[in-house]
Amino acid sequence: DSTKTLKPYRWEESIQRWVVCPFSFSDSLISIKSRDLGLFTLLNSEDKESPLIELQVENQPFSWGSYVPKNPVITVVIQDKSGVDIRPEKIEIFLDNELQDSYSLVLPDSTNDPTNITVLFRPNLKPGKHTIYVRACDVNGNIGQTDKIDFRVGSRLEIHFLGNHPNPFKRKTVFAYVLTEAAEDVSLKIYTVSGKLIRTLNDFDMTSPDYHEVVWD
């Protein structure tokens, strides 16, 4: 029955896309719920897949238990083959279970590629534990949501050195450590057992908060 996949859409001038309208279906009657006048049409859509949503912090994947800065740049990457609904009220970020104001989100200026959207969020965070998750939908009304991710903000800079592996080693080893806050400079110095400095490793990527691995051969 084609009526089961037939949905009413409204032309959204702000994003230059047809977007499904809230509606009810009874027998052969479709009732549209809309606060605004505009262009409406009926489209046949069998899309039932929710958007894929990925959270990143400081251009790194957002993982459970991560340390992040007090003023992080959080990136939300939303992908959907039918197109993402980028109206501000359709992209929701929940921080510590509270819905964030849409004005705090930086939405894309262009809709040249509506299948891949990047949203920026720059919160001011207090030290301690926090929770974040995101909800978004596509133009066909399918809703996607990330898992809740717990993360931490350090109250002061600490270095948690986790050691190196393998140990002992012949060809190479990996040094691992965690920074609770961003550091201005981090260096890793390697000495012989007699105390002679043989190598200093120093890189900008070593200074951000959270888990790091440094490979030495």
Image (tube, rainbow, N blue to C red):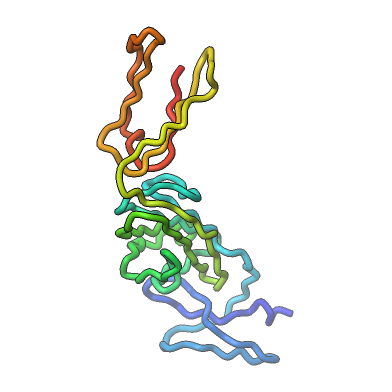
Horizontal arrangement in the rendering, residue 140 relative to residue 194 (left or right): right
Identify the residue at the far left of this view. Answer: 184
Identify the residue at the far right of this view. Answer: 1
Asked if one can make out residue 91 in the rendered structure from this viewpoint, the answer is no
Give me the residue at 38% from left, 55% from top: 128
Q: Is residue 182 above or below residue 162?
A: below
Query: Where residue 48 sits in the image (x, y, percent)?
Result: 63, 68
Give me the residue at 31% from left, 70% from top: 103
Query: Where residue 67 sits in the image (x, y, percent)?
Result: 40, 47
The quarter of the picture where residue 107 lies is bottom left
Horizontal arrangement in the rendering, residue 169 relative to residue 1 (left or right): left
Q: Quadrant of the N terminus?
A: bottom right
Identify the residue at the far top of this view. Answer: 194
Give me the residue at 41% from left, 87% from top: 36
Task: Please tell me which residue lies in front, 98 or 84.
Answer: 98
Horizontal arrangement in the rendering, residue 52 relative to residue 205 (left or right): right
Q: Is residue 107 above or below residue 1?
A: above
The quarter of the picture where residue 91 lies is bottom left
Task: Please tell me which residue lies in front, 34 or 160.
Answer: 160
Task: Please tell me which residue lies in front, 75 or 126.
Answer: 126
Give me the residue at 35% from left, 48% from top: 154
Query: Where residue 180 sits in the image (x, y, percent)?
Result: 36, 43
